[in-house]
Image (cartoon, helix red, strand yellow):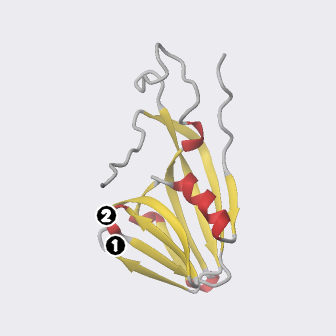
Amino acid sequence: MTAAPAAPIRLRAEDDEDLKVVSACLQDAILPIGDMGFLPDEKRFVMVVNRFRWESAARPRPGPTADDDDLAPFERVHCGVRVEGITGVKLRGIDVKDRGQILELLSLETVEGGVALHFAGGGCVRLDGAGWRLLVEDLGEPWPTGCKPSHVLEG
């Protein structure tokens, strides 16, 4: 018996608890630096990420073994992220002039007066806006990938 495919996500976050759920869904998303931008006149920050579908990563897969990634890959999907109510953006450890740079999103967290997006390598995007609202929605169909993100724990 095969498990039903996971449905596309469509989430909204308006506080710390909501943002923790969204952060878990977006962990290990990757994006070219050119796929994010601030629209000051609209008080909006947007980005399109390549999201690893954590919600489907543990489901049973066809093939000789459930761990056979070559025969039964994981999935990624394009995902739109929009943050409303943003009055300013600050960058740390990210060179916006390096247009070929690929960023890996590790987490999102609420900070005083806004939201912080933390990237691998120490980069951070701080979104200022006391009344922010974040919207996330999968775009299009997922595609297979044989790679599941993993993190080395420092101890």
Identify the disc placed on residue 94. Answer: 1
Is 7 situated left or right of 119 in this image?
Answer: right
- The 10 Å Cα crowd at callout 2, few under 14, some 14 to 19, many 20 or more, is few
Secondary structure category for the residue under label 1? loop
* Location of residue 87 by image quarter: bottom right
Q: Between 73 and 113, which is closer to the camera in this rendering?
A: 113
Closer to the observer: label 2 or label 1? Answer: 2
Residue 59 location, x and y as percent?
A: 58, 30
**C-alpha separation, residue under disc 2 versus residue under disc 1:** 9 Å
Give the residue number, with chain letter if any, for mark 2. Answer: 121
Classify 75 as above or below 126: above
Is the C-beta separation of discs 2 and 1 under 8 Å? no
Residue 96 location, x and y as percent?
A: 35, 74
Q: Residue at x 46, y 63 (%)?
A: 35
Say what amino acid the circle numbered 1 marks: Ile
- The 10 Å Cα crowd at callout 1, few under 14, some 14 to 19, many 20 or more, is some
Q: Residue furthest top?
A: 64
Q: Residue at x 40, y 64 (%)?
A: 119
Q: Residue furthest front?
A: 155
Classify 24 as above or below 134: above
Considering only order in the chain, which callout, 1 or 2, is on the residue closer to the N terminus?
A: 1
Secondary structure category for the residue under label 2? helix
Q: Residue at x 36, y 70 (%)?
A: 123
Identify the disc placed on residue 51. Answer: none
Q: Residue at x 47, y 17 (%)?
A: 65
Residue 44 location, x and y as percent?
A: 60, 77
